[in-house]
Every structure is written in structure tokens, then in C-alpha cells.
Image: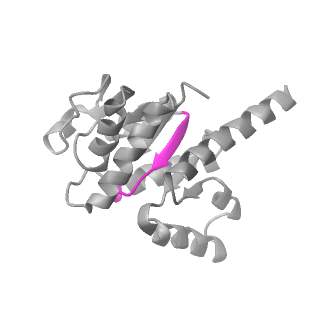
């Protein structure tokens, strides 16, 4: 599975507990150690910057995707291996979606939730079949998981949406879930061929 490109969605804020920063920087290091690439929003702050720093610290590849106008609010990580500039937030997401083999969502704010739900919706609509993993550091995503469960129980969300993403409570779980889902998808494609 070498050569996978992992898309990470996460916080740009620097006002967050260091436990999240440390966990996401370790996630970035592991991306590089596994020989994978990172594609992300290109920022140098918050969990975005932490992940990119982790990848770079182990000699990995970082592809940053950022709209032209955003650099004022969200400084660009200068050590990106490649920086792709887009005209809009929508184009930024499209570039990341098209170039990723899997999506990992780490704690974040409204932008992160937008990215997660768009990616989840596209998977539910059959526009992609890539793994989506919520990295549930210190239980951060439990309210989100409960929200989706309530939506399913009340009939607002189709039950199969619960199968369209997975929840990882440890770094090992993140990569295990990605690798298992990609391996299963490859087996299915071979069987159908």
C-alpha cells in the first residue's frame, strides 16, 4: 500500500489544547514513516500545521492546497513539497478530494465539519468509495457520532451512512482502518473483474 495519499482535514486554530497538537503531529510522522503522502489545506497553524510538520520531520511529502485569498487568515506552511493555489474554497476541496486515496478527519471547527460532511455525503451518493476515518482524539468526535446516530434513529439519515465512515480512537486504528478498507476494495474489484 505504499504511495497512498492521505487527505487530512483539521483545525487551523492555535487556541487548542496541546494534546491535540501532539497527537496530530505524531499522525503526520506516521504518514511519512509508512511511505504515504499528505494532502491538506496548506496551513501552518493549528492541527494542519502540526500534521505537516510531522510529515516533513520524517522526510515525507506534503501537498498543500490553499485558496489565494486565505493566506491572510491562515498562513501557508512554507515547507510544503508542493503548494497548489485555488480560486475558491470549493475548488480547494475538489483538488483534495480528487487526489486523496483516504480521508482522515482530526478535531477541528466549522470548516473541518464542512469538509467531513461533504466527503461523507459524496461517498453516500456513490461519487467516491474512499475510506473516511474520524480520528477521535480524547473523545472529541463523540457528540458528532451521537448526532449521526440520532439522525439515523429518527429517520433523517439513512442507516448505511454509519457504514460509510469509521471511528479510530488511536493512531494504530487510523491506519489499520484505512489499510483494511483499501484492501477489501481491491479484493472486491479483483473478484468483479
Quadrant location, the C terminus: top right
Q: Residue at x 39, y 38 (%)?
A: 29
Q: Position of residue 68 (x, y in %)?
A: 22, 31
Which image quarter: residue 20? bottom left
Relative to 15, 58 lies left or right: right
Q: Position of residue 1 (x, y in %)?
A: 62, 29
Q: Residue at x 69, y 64 (%)?
A: 159
Which image quarter: residue 19? bottom left
Q: How is the image coloured?
A: one colour
Q: Identify whether 134 is placed above or below 153.
A: above
> Foreground: 17 or 190?
17
Residue 190 belongs to the span the image colors magenta: no
Relative to 157, 96 lies left or right: left
Relative to 37, 3 lies left or right: right
Q: Position of residue 182 (x, y in %)?
A: 66, 37
Q: Identify whether 151 is placed above or below 7.
A: below
Q: Residue at x 30, y 53 (%)?
A: 21
Instruction: Return the residue found at the far left.
Output: 72
Q: Position of residue 46 (x, y in %)?
A: 25, 50
- Tell me how many marks there are: 0
> Foreground: 12 or 127?
12
Q: Identify whether 84 is placed above or below 94.
A: above
Give the magenta-colored segment's residue range: 101-110
Q: Kindly tell me whether residue 129 is visible in this rendering.
A: no
Amino acid at each position: 500500500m505504499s504511495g497512498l495519499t492521505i487527505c487530512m482535514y483539521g483545525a487551523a486554530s492555535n487556541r487548542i489544547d496541546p494534546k491535540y497538537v501532539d497527537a496530530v503531529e505524531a499522525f503526520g510522522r506516521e504518514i511519512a514513516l509508512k511511505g504515504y503522502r499528505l494532502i491538506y489545506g496548506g496551513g501552518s497553524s493549528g492541527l494542519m500545521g502540526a500534521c505537516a510538520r510531522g510529515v516533513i520531520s520524517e522526510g515525507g511529502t506534503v501537498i498543500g492546497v490553499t485558496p489565494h485569498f486565505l493566506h491572510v487568515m491562515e498562513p501557508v506552511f512554507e515547507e510544503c513539497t508542493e503548494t497548489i493555489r485555488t480560486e475558491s474554497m470549493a475548488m480547494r476541496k475538489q483538488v483534495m478530494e480528487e487526489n486523496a486515496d483516504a480521508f482522515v478527519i482530526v478535531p477541528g471547527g466549522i470548516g473541518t465539519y464542512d469538509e467531513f460532511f461533504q466527503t461523507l455525503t459524496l461517498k453516500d451518493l456513490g461519487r467516491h468509495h474512499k475510506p473516511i476515518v474520524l480520528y477521535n482524539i480524547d473523545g472529541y468526535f463523540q457528540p458528532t457520532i451521537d448526532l449521526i446516530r440520532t439522525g439515523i434513529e429518527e429517520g433523517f439519515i439513512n442507516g448505511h451512512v454509519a457504514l460509510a465512515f469509521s471511528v479510530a480512537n488511536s493512531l494504530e486504528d487510523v491506519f489499520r482502518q484505512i489499510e483494511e478498507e483499501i484492501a477489501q476494495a481491491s479484493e472486491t474489484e479483483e473478484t468483479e473483474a
